[in-house]
Amino acid sequence: MTRLYPEIDPFEHGMLPSTDGNLLYFESCGNRDGKPALVLHGGPGSGCAPWHRRLFNPSAYRVVLFDQRGCGRSKPLASDPGTDLTTNHTANLITDIELLRRHLEIERWMVLGGSWGSVLALAYAEAQPDRVTELVLFGVATGRRKEFDWLFRGGVAALFPEEWEQLRAAAPEAACDGDVVDACRRRLNDADPAVRREAALAWCRWESATPSWPPAHTLARRFADADFRIGFARLVTHYVSNDAFLEDGILLRHAQSIAGISMIMVNGRFDFQAPIGWAWDLKRTLPSARLVVIDNAGHAATNEGVTEELVAATDEFARLKNSQRPPSG
């Protein structure tokens, strides 16, 4: 049975002004004086969820969650076609994280991230290694072009041909240049609301096909809301079209900069969105990192076995009160 800590409510929450007119929703849960931990949600565009709080011992941790630019309770939302995504990119998300850390007067924190959140966690840790005490990653990806191509440009489509054809049918202009991501992105920014709604539904049906083991063949519950679908799809296609605003392979090439940070990675054996080969590439670069493979699980962190290992990881790191390295300034 999946083991999570009991449900808890935040002891503080608010809206933090950031750059470019963004307001970031954040919350803190657990023990005010506990070990600080930051949760980076996936998507991009999924938003933080109450179950994230339950991955941590509330008596040991001060757990911080926030909704990244354009999603969740942050403002403005990407679901609004008038929201310009130009300044929504990885470097600014890292700036937002640092702004939040300083606002909460936290010196260093553990960082937990899954899927897109694992990419952002790596990017943040490499940019600010003295601010990260430990890393817990799941559904691990490293932001390489081949990873985006696998999921969104036909790689995994060999395992989901029917769902892939449905996505391509929703963006027929992809037949001309072969890039279904850019075709969907253009439709998601179309002036016609019906075109935007149709493209978002098609995109989210594809996103629903690949996370679970065994695979699901219905629209995921989190995509029930039409506005959420549009915001989520706009953000994902925006980031994928721009290769997550990262130089190809840079997070792996710079991984030695975080060799002193303890890291636990958790991946399902049948993770179709982030195959364990991506995590294995990171482990080869950082041999001291621990990779836990769950044989009967997919990408979803709620799969039996994945949740247990994430809780075990946070429990293990709860016993480490201080960072392995002092801050440089």
Image (cartoon, rainbow, N blue to C red):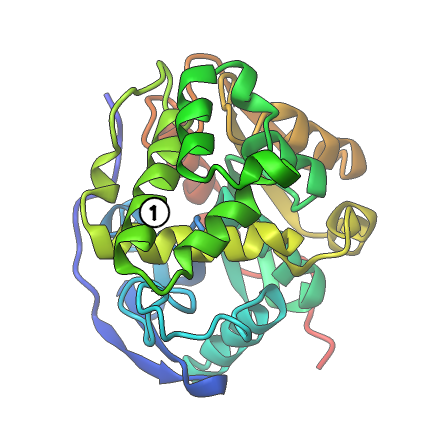
> Where, quadrant-wise, is the C terminus in this rendering?
bottom right
> Where, quadrant-wise, is the N terminus in this rendering?
top left
| Numbered disc 1: secondary structure | helix
Q: Name the residue under label 1.
A: 200
- For the point 50% across and 23% down, which residue is it? 271
Q: Hey, which quadrant is residue 68 in on the image?
A: bottom left
Q: Say few, some or many: other residues with alpha carbon within 10 Å of mark 1 (under 14 / 14 to 19 / 20 or more).
A: many
**The disc labelled 1 sits on which kind of residue?**
Ala
Residues 316 and 310: in front is 310
- For the point 56% across and 55% down, which residue is it? 239
**Residue 58 visible in image:** no
Residue 171 image offset from top left, x and y in percent: 45, 40
Q: In this view, does 47 lie above or below 304?
A: below
Residue 18 image offset from top left, x and y in percent: 45, 84
Residues 198 and 173: in front is 173
Residue 203 image offset from top left, x and y in percent: 39, 40
- For the point 45% across and 23% down, which residue is it? 165
Q: Is residue 295 above or below residue 300?
A: above
Residue 5 image offset from top left, x and y in percent: 24, 42
**Residue 131 visible in image:** yes
- For the point 42% across and 61% down, which residue is it? 189
